[in-house]
Amino acid sequence: MEIKVGIGDHAVAKKTGIISTYGLGSCVGITLYDRLTKVGGLLHALLPESSRYGGKGNPAKYVDTGLELLIRDMVKLGASPRRLEAKLFGGAHMFSNVNNENLMIGKKNVEVAKRELRKRGIKLVAEDTGGRGGRTIYLDVSTGKVRMRKVSGGKVMETVF
């Protein structure tokens, strides 16, 4: 069974299944996993901080509030926040003609994701961020492994984290 997560969305599962998200550009994909209970989750966040963008609308589209939703739903399935491990993907710089620091959303998404994980005491165990390519990720809930497909410069690369 595959659960597909869209932009500004998240999903959780326990013991079996694949949770995936497609087309991570400047967005970030954050996976969380509790090895003991085999509860996994994935967030596909579009923007870094809800307060910076008025905090309106869907909280899952922001890294900070989306992470809270993801953790809450994983706890409902039996995960412990103290045992969570994170993997971080995306945050690409998609437009080479944009050099204004305020418009580098991908970089800011990665910075905020790392800050929010640290703040919650969640260990970041793997990441593939930055660059210019798009990424698709698949979290295997039975193992916690993430398969990433990255397209950059016309080349396709697959890696397992």
Image (tube, rainbow, N blue to C red):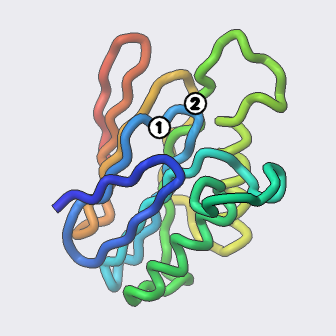
Q: Of label 2 and label 1, which has the lower sequence position?
A: 1
Are there few (<14), some (14-19), or many (20+) residues within 10 Å of tag 2? many
Q: Disc 1 residue type? A: Leu
Residue 46 falls in image quadrant? top right
Q: Nearer the viewer, residue 127 or 39?
A: 39
Q: Nearer the viewer, residue 102 or 149?
A: 102
Residue drawn 44% across the image and 88% down it: 76
Q: For mark 2, give the secondary structure.
A: loop
Residue 100 falls in image quadrant? top right
Q: Which quadrant is the N terminus positioned in?
A: bottom left
Q: Disc 2 residue type? A: Ala
Q: Nearer the viewer, residue 130 or 134?
A: 134
For this orientation, the residue located farthest to the front is 57
The tag on residue 42 is none
Residue 126: where, in percent of width, then height?
Answer: 48, 52
For this orientation, the residue located farthest to the left is 1
Residue 51: where, in percent of width, then height?
Answer: 82, 58
Q: Is residue 74 above or below residue 86?
A: below
Residue 133: where, in percent of width, then height?
Answer: 47, 24
The tag on residue 92 is 2
Discs 2, 1 touching: Cβ within 8 Å: yes
Image check: 137 left or right of 109?
left
Image check: 107 left or right of 26?
right
Q: Is residue 127 above or below residue 25?
A: below
Image check: 136 left or right of 10?
left
Q: Is residue 158 visible?
A: yes
Residue drawn 61% across the image and 60% down it: 58
Residue 83: where, in percent of width, then height?
Answer: 49, 80
Image check: 54 left or right of 131?
right
- Spatial CA span between label 2 and label 1: 8 Å
Q: For mark 1, give the secondary structure.
A: strand
Which residue was labeled with disc 1? 24
